[in-house]
Image (spheres, grey):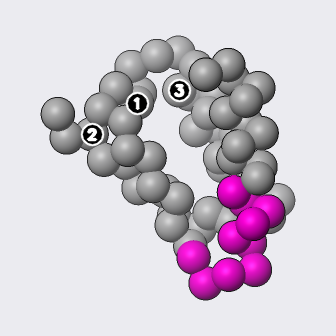
Amino acid sequence: FPILQVKEEIDFIARKYQNYPHINFNITDENFGINKRDVEIAEYLSEISRKNGYPKQIACYFDK
């Protein structure tokens, strides 16, 4: 997906869950971390976490 769409989806999820007890954001992608844009996505998640308080934890599942 285009990076703008990924960021908009992260924003939507962060707004939806910032007042709920969910603290985890799970990334299930066996190739996450391989592409250069993955760094931008991780940095954006960190920024959103500081602004919204969600997610407090990020878990990645890479099993192939």
Residue corresponding to mark 3? 38
> What kind of residue is marked 1?
Phe
- Whole-Å distance between the Cαs marked 3 and 1? 6 Å
Residue position for label 1: 32
| Crowdedness near tag 1: few (<14), some (14–19) or many (≥20) residues, C-alpha within 10 Å | some
The residue positioned 38% from the left and 44% from the top of the image is 28
Comes first in the chain, label 3 or label 1: 1
- Specify whether residue 14 is painted magenta: yes
Type of amino acid at the residue the image marks with label 2: Phe
Task: Name the spot of residue 9 as percent of width and height, x first.
Answer: 70, 43
User: Can residue 49 be seen here?
Assistant: no
User: Residue 64's x, y, as percent?
Assistant: 17, 33
Which residues make up the magenta segment?
A: 13-22
Can you give x and y, in whole percent of width and height, for residue 38 in the image? 53, 26
Q: Secondary structure at mark 3?
A: helix
* 56 left or right of 18 in image: left
Name the secondary structure under disc 2: loop
Does residue 37 show up magenta in the picture? Answer: no
User: Where residue 60 sits in the image (x, y, percent)?
Assistant: 37, 48
